[in-house]
Amino acid sequence: MGRNAVRAAALAIACGAGTLALSAVPAQAAAGWKNVGGAGLAYDGSLDRIDFGAANAGWAVGAAGSFFSPQTKIAKWNGSAWVAQASPVGFTPTDVAVASASKAWIVGYNLGGTVGLYWNGAKWSKAAYPLVGLPSQVAAAPDGTAYSVAGVDPTAGGLSAVLRWTGTAWADAKVPLPASSTITAVDVKSKNDVWLAGSTSATGTSVTGLVMHYDGKAWKRIAVPGSLGTPAYQGTLYKIVENSPTNVYVLRVRQNAQITNAILRYDGTSWKTINTPLNTAGIGLSADGKGGVVMLPVTTGTRTQYMHYNGTSWTTLNGPARSGAVQASDADARPGTAAIVSAGTATQTGKKVPFIEYYG
C-alpha cells in the first residue's frame, strides 16, 4: 500500500473520509485571493495543515515520499515567503499548532508509532507523545497552553485520548469523560478555556454528541441534543470552534448515519442546528474572525471552495483558479491582520503541487 493510501486510512480517524481540512475566509469576492509561494513549497507531495499564532508566526506541514520512508515537510512564514525547515525525524504530520513565534507543536506518526515535535523559538526537537492511537488534532493558545487528540478510529466510536502539554512532553489530560465516550475535536483559547467535542453511547445502541468545557478549575459536560445514529452507523463531531463562550460552533458530519450534515451553534445555554448548503459534508471548520464560521467541503474542481456562515445565512465562494484537481486542506486567520491563509495540494498529471493562498 502506498503512503497516500495508508495516510488516508490513518487520517480517517479525524474525519472518516481520509482528508483533513478546515478553512476561514470572509464573504468577499474570489478576486481577492492571492497565491503566496516560497522555497518551502517546492516539492512533490501534500500540504496538509497550517496555523498562525501571531501575524508573522505561522507554519505549514505536509509530507512527501512513502509511508515506509516519509519525508516530513515543514514550511515557516518569514514575513514575505514560506521557507523550508528540517525535521529531526521522518514522519507524516497530521496537525500543527502555533502559540507564538517561540512555541509551536507538530504531531503525526511513522512506522515507529506516534511522533511529536516542539519548536522552542530556535529549533524543532522531538517531544514524547504516548502511544495512544494516532494523533489527529493539536490546538494551542497564545499563553502556551496546548492540547492534542489521538485515537484508534474514534469517528466510528473507537478508543481516544486527550493529551495536555506539560512544558516538556505530552501527558494524559485526565478528562472525566462518561463511559463509552470518544473525543474527536479540540479547541484551546487559554489555560482556563478549553473545548472538546466527540460522542458517547451510554446504552450501546444509540450515539449522541458530547462537548466538554474546562474553565481552569473543572471540566463541565455540555449535552448535545439529537442523535448521531447508532454504533457502526454514526455521524461524528469533527471540529469545534469557539468564538466566545456564548458563540461556539461544532461541525457535524453524517458519515453513515441517517442525519443531515450541519453545523451546531451553542449560545451558552442551548444549541441550534444549521444544515449545510445542499447537505454538503464539511471536512473542516474555522472561525471567520467576525463571529461566524467557514466550512470547507470536499472540492473536485480547479478552485478551492469555501462556505461562509455569518450567523444568519450561508455564502459560497471560490479561491483562485489552478491547474489540476484542487483540494484545500487547512486554513487559519493571521492574528493582528485581515489576512486568511489557506493551504492545500493540486494534483497535476500525477504530481502533487503544494500551494498556499490568502485573502487580505
Image: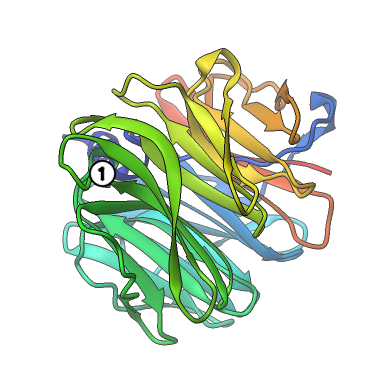
Neighbours of disc 1 within 10 Å: few (<14), some (14-19), many (20+): many
Examine the rendered structure and indicate whether residue 94 appears above or below residue 174. Answer: above
Q: Is residue 4 left or right of residue 36?
A: left
Q: Is residue 313 left or right of residue 276?
A: right
Taking depth in this image into account, of 87 and 55 the one nearest to the observer is 55
Quarter occupied by the C terminus: top right
Quarter occupied by the N terminus: top left
Q: Residue furthest top?
A: 278
How many badges with numbers are in the image? 1
Q: Secondary structure at mark 1?
A: helix
Taking depth in this image into account, of 327 and 338 the one nearest to the observer is 338
Examine the rendered structure and indicate whether residue 159 appears above or below residue 283. Answer: below
Q: Position of residue 114 (x, y in %)?
A: 25, 64
Q: Quadrant of residue 166?
A: bottom left
Q: Which residue is rendered at x = 51% and y = 17% of the image?
A: 279
Q: Position of residue 246 (x, y in %)?
A: 67, 55
Q: Is residue 244 visible to us here?
A: yes
Please state which amino acid type lies under the numbered disc 1.
Answer: Ala
Taking depth in this image into account, of 223 and 231 the one nearest to the observer is 223
Residue bearing mark 1: 10
Q: Is residue 32 left or right of residue 240?
A: right
Q: Which residue is rendered at x = 17% and y = 57% of the image?
A: 111
Q: Position of residue 106 (x, y in %)?
A: 44, 64
Q: Is residue 89 visible to us here?
A: no
Q: Position of residue 178 (x, y in %)?
A: 27, 60
Q: Which residue is rendered at x = 23% and y = 35% of the image?
A: 206
Examine the rendered structure and indicate whether residue 5 appears above or below residue 93. Answer: above
